[in-house]
Amino acid sequence: MNLVSFKWIIQWAIIGLLVIGHSEAAFRHSFRTSAQDGFAKRNRQLATEQKYNPNYKGQFQLDTSSITFSDGVVSGILKKQIPEKVDLLFPFTVSFLQDGSTRFQLDEKRRLEGDVDYDDAKVRMDRFDVAQYHDLGSRINVDTERPEVKIHNKKLLKVDYGNDQRFSMILHFQPFMIEFLRDDTVEIVLNQRQLLNMEHYRPRAERTREDESLGMWEEKFDNILDSKPRGPESLGLDISFIGYKHVYGIPEHTSSLSLKETNNSETGYTDPYRLYNVDIFEYEVDSPMSQYGAIPFMQAHKVNSDVGIFWSNAAATWIDIEKDSSSTSTHWYSESGKLDVFIYLGPTALDLYEAYSGLTGRTQLPPLFSIGYHQCRWNYFSEEDVQNVDNTFNEVDMPYDAIWLDIDYTSGRRYFTWDEATFPHPQETLKKLDSNGRKMVVILDPHIKNDPNYFVSKELLENGFTVKDSSGVENYNAECWPGDSVWVDFFNMEGQEWWGSLYSYDKFKGSDKNLFIWNDMNEPSVFKGPETSMHRDAIHHGGWEHRDIHNLYGHECINSTYRGMVKRDNGVLRPFILTRSFFAGTNALAASWIGDTLGTWEHFRGSLATVLTNGVAGMPFSGADVAGFFGNPDPELFVRWYELGIFYPFFRAHAHIDTKRREPWLYGEPYTSMIRNLLGIRYRLLPTWYTTFHTTHMTGLPILRPQFLAHPADEIGFDIDNQFYLGDSGLLIKPILEPSIDKTAVYIADDETYYDFYDFNEINGKGHHVVPAPLGKIPILLRGGNILVTRERIRRASELTINDPFTLYIAVSSKTGSATGDLYMDDGTSFDYTKGAYISRKITFKDGVLDVLDTHPHPQSGIRYAESMKHLKVERIILIGVNQQKIKIRKHGISGVSSWDVKVDTDGVIKKPDLYLV
Ligand SMILES: *[C@@H]1O[C@H](CO)[C@@H](O)[C@H](O)[C@H]1NC(C)=O
Ligand SMILES: *[C@@H]1O[C@H](CO)[C@@H](O)[C@H](O)[C@H]1NC(C)=O
């Protein structure tokens, strides 16, 4: 949700009078363009100069005598060429890591050594190091064995590294440039355009008049002053992907999946893509403007090849993208921090995701319930309201897993309290929900009402765990939902512990085991703050400026909540947390949604590429509010949004307080039945969803797979972002994103047979195929060669299905006549799976034989859990594309193989195959 501050209301009123409905300009100018962000302007100027000035030279010269290689690390020193300045030294390293990636780091010597003077400012001297702060150290292991110097002469240094020394790095001395090769082909180049930049330390006394226009020593935006106590300190680098026309990632934007060129009149993007977490009101669709989360990870893809980079920086960052006929050149610049880039050479997407997520964190295996349907609204106003909604779900026979409370359940927006008039008995409400296996999720934000009589505020202030203003001493005070507020400083580890402890049952009175958490507004959102966020010169624990850590604030908030929730349940149960803000690695802790969408077709369409991009870049448990946060969608849009919603990894209905009520039955028939069917599809497919989440948890692969990942050799698919596959299930989904149509063309990239999910009609052949899509029926195809595992009984909530039998849909390949599928399951709630308590099966079908294999890597460790699941059976097998009267089933267990024949009915169905999975 978002603020509508006084200023906005005035602005809107004026604009409303002038051009009704044309709102873009009004809100756009609440956020900086790159020209209004001094450091961005300076770095972009460098790019322009490089383009037009034939005498342009990079700023740095390598001291060739400084180059050394030892224990997997190349070190050297760059000198900055500035007239009348000597000894501007910038040590750098290139480290070769055990996961096959490479890391390039650069810093200024003076700042490393603390040899600087920032007058009386309460800021520290060194540059912020994300990897160190983020505690990634234990995951960064230098490879001291394999890397080997192959050439070292006057011009270059060449090191071969990685498996079989398949990768090489060539460091060119003059001009300074680093190439990364795979099998002797250049894939990625750093500093090809000589845009490497790191603004050196300068004492304030040296400022010149010229500096003013470039925003070096102080800068105003929206009439708010940024005092810049350390002066200019930005850093930048150009990174080229050779032979790659498509790059993906760097969420969060509502742009296309394949990223567009910036500073380009054809794409309409005049600004670079921006990474600066903001609470953005009714954001623009198809724009490089920042949104709520930031992940500086980019992937480049060409036929059967994937490479990528991670720009490890949490300050405001902009990324320009330029393409020529065969390659993509990107230019990254950040306001402060160290220069730290990880380079990944694939060659497959799986290699890339495994290495990248191995560094920043694998996606959490969430509790099963959180993959079900969530019902939210700002606000369910009372216990009666909650009861009524809950009861009506039962009456209309629709499943759901969690009901959500937005800010108004609290006593005056004091988080960790309940409004005594409207929620006098939260625990009774929770018990009632629990009797149907349902949960409640409540909002708790990191801004705290400044009120000495409120226990959270009191403890926060007494302990001094607040963010401080630019004085470094006074509390940072501003407006947010509760009015006058202060902010928790998650960069203080004790503050993190304290925030985490608030979730314990004795602190958060009225909470219980089926209560889970939503942390919103954690960009952080600050009403009337610059760009509705925190002042960049606010000070965090340890002397960090807010500018250094901005994009990491939400992540640290979530980590603190996560650890608090783990502790609440004694380390036994998996937490569920929803966050709006995120950074690289937040996927290990929480789900996210894409914020304040409008209930319009445009925003609906925009949500898909955003969710796909979040997935590709490592935030896969993501979704958009169904059916848009603002506004009152008509029945057609409402139903279409549920159609896509059942395929968002995070599936939640939510709506603004000013919208009409829109629980899924309120539009009446025929829409209610349509939505009931759609919810049914989500719940029937839960075993497949859960298996997919587990694959993501283990590998880093996204949950929703865009065309370019599912068919890495098919170039036509590289910029398709209006259809996608669900994990490895073989399900291909083509949502309807336009009004007034009842069919659509789905793109098939291969010669496989695809089967219509509803009637098993066959679709054959590469190319576009028209499929029916009447309202209420989202086109879903099942690719031949896949076995789909479902549970066909719809119950009130996902947890109630845990003992239900399975159905197998076996869709054979028209090429090989075979099919395979996977099933992962565990208790859906606890961490016991980390000790082996799960079931893992591979199911294959070939030549009339169905094999069920135990794929648990340590079957004995899971035996107790497996024993408790002995009753789990397959109640039906549906053969698609097979014409046989009987098949053989073979079960391979620890105790050997058993096999038997079963009869196939004329409709291809095997009833009661007598197959138990354990
Ligand atoms: C952006 O485009 C304009 C016009 O083509 C050009 O003059 C300018 O140098 C470009 N800026 C950058 C940063 O590439
Ligand atoms: C969360 O914080 C703990 C303690 O600082 C740290 O060890 C862990 O790596 C963090 N997790 C993530 C995902 O940032």
Image (cartoon, rainbow, N blue to C red):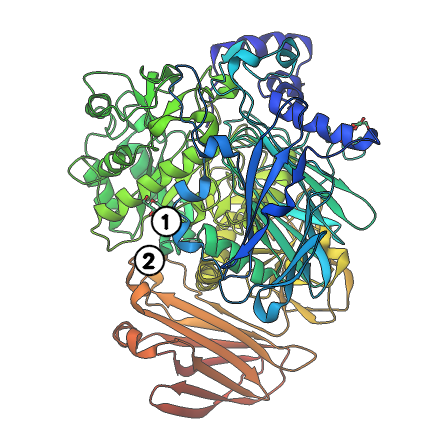
Asked if residue 830 is positioned above or below residue 48 in the image, the reply reads below
What amino acid type should be assigned to the residue bearing mark 2?
Glu
The picture places residue 498, in percent across and down from the top left corner, at 23, 34
Q: Secondary structure at mark 2?
A: helix
Residue 213 or 866: which is nearer the viewer?
Answer: 213
Q: Residue at x 72, y 40 (%)?
A: 260
Q: Residue at x 44, y 31 (%)?
A: 126
Q: Residue at x 76, y 28 (%)?
A: 48
Classify 10 Å Cα crowding around label 1: few (below 14), some (14-19), many (20 and above): many
Q: On the image, numbered disc 2 is attached to which residue?
A: 799
Residue 905 or 604: which is nearer the viewer?
Answer: 604
Task: Evaluate if marks 2 and 1 touch, with contact meaning CB atoms under 8 Å apart.
Answer: yes
Residue 718 in the figure: left or right of residue 554: right
The residue at the far front in this view is 65
Q: Is residue 797 visible?
A: no
Q: Secondary structure at mark 1?
A: loop
Q: Is mark 1 within 8 Å of ligand 2?
A: no
Residue 884 or 156: which is nearer the viewer?
Answer: 156
The picture places residue 834, in percent across and down from the top left corner, at 32, 63
Residue 586 or 781: which is nearer the viewer?
Answer: 586
Instruction: Name the quarter where the C terminus is drawn.
Output: bottom left
The picture places residue 27, in percent across and down from the top left corner, at 60, 19
Q: On the image, numbered disc 1 is attached to which residue?
A: 401
Asked if residue 501 is positioned above or below residue 571 in the image, the reply reads above
Q: CA distance from mark 2 to mark 1?
A: 8 Å
Q: Residue at x 64, y 72 (%)?
A: 784
What amino acid type should be assigned to the residue bearing mark 1?
Asp
